[in-house]
């Protein structure tokens, strides 16, 4: 898609620090390098985010996320991995081309993904009623 930063990277109009590529996906270093090794995985066909990506494309992206994550562990670069997707501006998405963030984690790296205390069962049930999705 014209004017899409990650489409330009895929077309090689803009350079990137490539980690892995296959027919459907590309993985490259996040320019922030924060933390070191922060990697993005994108589909080669343009999809804005989780809301409009089709199942086949999403599966290809997830497969590359798995492959790259496992590689980082296998070469001893990461002890663990966090992955996340920002979908929608309100969720902090800045580049409107679907991308999965891979954050390599090391023992005592000081990165905190905080957990809030558990809520009551009643509250959880109420939320469940609001959110249930039938198969
Ligand atoms: P998000 O907030 O989920 O849309 O994340 C966008 C990410 O893209 C940020 O972590 C940026 O650091 C990263 N980014 C922006 N421009 C580039 C670029 N040219 N190459 C690699 N990563 C980039």
Image (cartoon, rainbow, N blue to C red):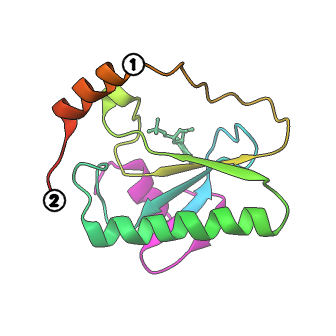
Query: Cα distance, mark 2 to mark 1?
Result: 27 Å
| x then y, percent, for residue 64 | 53, 69
Quadrant for the N terminus in the image = bottom left
Disc 1 element: loop
**The one of 34 and 109 positioned closer to us in this rendering:** 109
Q: Is residue 19 visible?
A: no
Residue in view at x 41 percent, y 72 percent: 60
Disc 2 element: loop
Side of 109 relative to 98 (left or right): right
Residue 129, placed above or below residue 60: above
Side of 83 relative to 25 (left or right): right
Residue at the far front in the pictured view: 121
Residue 55, placed above or below residue 34: below
Residue in view at x 78 percent, y 54 percent: 78
Density class for disc 1 (Cα within 10 Å; few <14, some 14-19, many ≥20) is few
In this rendering, which labeled residue sits more in front, label 2 or label 1? 1
Quadrant for the C terminus in the image = bottom left
Does residue 6 belong to the magenta stretch?
yes
**Which residue is labeled 1 in the image?**
120
Side of 87 relative to 117 (left or right): left
| x then y, percent, for residue 32 | 65, 38
| Beta carbon at label 2 within 8 Å of ligand 1 | no
Does residue 31 belong to the magenta stretch?
no
**Which residue is labeled 2 in the image?**
135
| x then y, percent, for residue 134 | 14, 52
Residue 8, placed above or below residue 32: below
- The residue stretch that appears in magenta: 1-26
- Which image quarter: residue 2? bottom left
**The one of 47 and 109 positioned closer to us in this rendering:** 109
| Beta carbon at label 1 within 8 Å of ligand 1 | no
Disc number placed over residue 5 in the picture, else none:
none
Residue in view at x 30 percent, y 20 percent: 122
């Amino acid at each position: 898609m014209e004017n899409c930063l990650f489409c330009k990277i895929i077309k090689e109009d803009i350079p990137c620090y490539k980690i892995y590529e296959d027919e459907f996906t590309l993985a490259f270093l996040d320019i922030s390098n924060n933390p070191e090794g922060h990697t993005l995985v994108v589909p080669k066909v343009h999809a804005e985010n989780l809301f409009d990506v089709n199942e086949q494309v999403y599966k290809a992206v997830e497969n590359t996320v798995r492959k790259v994550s496992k590689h980082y562990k296998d070469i001893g670069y990461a002890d663990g991995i966090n992955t996340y997707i920002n979908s929608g501006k309100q969720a902090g998405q800045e580049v409107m081309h679907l991308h999965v963030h891979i954050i390599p984690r090391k023992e005592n790296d000081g990165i905190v993904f905080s957990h809030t205390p558990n809520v009551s069962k009643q509250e959880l049930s109420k939320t469940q009623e609001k959110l249930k999705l039938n198969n």
